[in-house]
Amino acid sequence: DTGVSQDPRHKITKRGQNVTFRCDPISEHNRLYWYRQTLGQGPEFLTYFQNEAQLEKSRLLSDRFSAERPKGSFSTLEIQRTEQGDSAMYLCASSSAVGEGNEQFFGPGTRLTVL
Amino acid sequence: KQEVTQIPAALSVPEGENLVLNCSFTDSAIYNLQWFRQDPGKGLTSLLLIQSSQREQTSGRLNASLDKSSGRSTLYIAASQPGDSATYLCASSNTDKLIFGTGTRLQVFP
């Protein structure tokens, strides 16, 4: 396993369209996180899963956003009715059990541009 | 609410210099602190993780220290190289989500 992977790497869409991103974590990791990063800022937490359970959602995650992790493996992040303010880099990270320090490993990100 | 601040925001140095990047956080009840490197348009690469019970971690030319009582961490880069040019981010964790600073943009010129 070479690390966290994300697909697609880039997405350009028109305002009002729906988009879906996929994240495949490191195989033995049970925690999966989604973050959003805008230009010049540090990443901001959106949500995270432990196995298939979604344990926390940020207030940044409006009702247009939904995330799933069926079977506790890969995860998808869907944005409905995209807005120009959704343009950002969407980053996925994974980690193993908290007892190992919960070091998070990030994927390459999906760059979303909403026209 | 945890807030993480990084100083300086940008740094430009000649090759070979030793550097110190600073990170401060407002809530000392952290689980760990993690330093990352980010190249333009790319994801984050984990550099060092310091658990709350530790004082420092070292990897090659990098050394990170943690002082929970003062709410500070530093990343020391020895003998900087042009390939070290990137944005360096620190993030604190309370066992789940990471809270990031805005980063220090480092340029090392030959």
Image: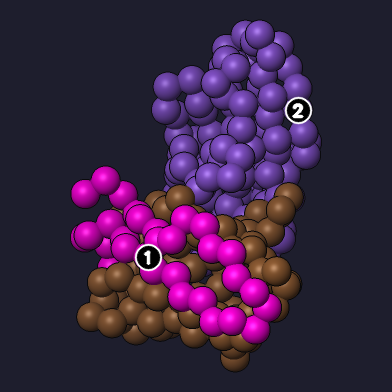
Chain colours: A brown, B purple
Are callouts 2 and 1 both on one chain? no
Q: SS class of the residue under badge 1? A: strand
Q: Is residue B2 left or right of residue B50?
A: right
Give the numbered dot on residue B11: 2
Residue range in magenta is A1-30
Residue A50 x %, y %: 34, 75
Q: Is residue B37 above or below residue B29?
A: above
- Which residue, given by chain and number where applicable, does mark 1 sit on? A23
- Give, as a three-letter code, the residue at label 1: Cys
Q: Is residue A88 above or below residue B19?
A: below
- Give, as a three-letter code, the residue at label 2: Leu
Tell me if residue A26 is in the magenta stretch: yes
Residue B4 x %, y %: 69, 55
In the rendered image, which quarter contains the C terminus of chain B?
A: top right
Q: What is the quadrant of residue A32 in the picture?
A: bottom left
Q: Residue furthest bottom?
A: A63
Q: CA distance from mark 2 to mark 1?
A: 33 Å
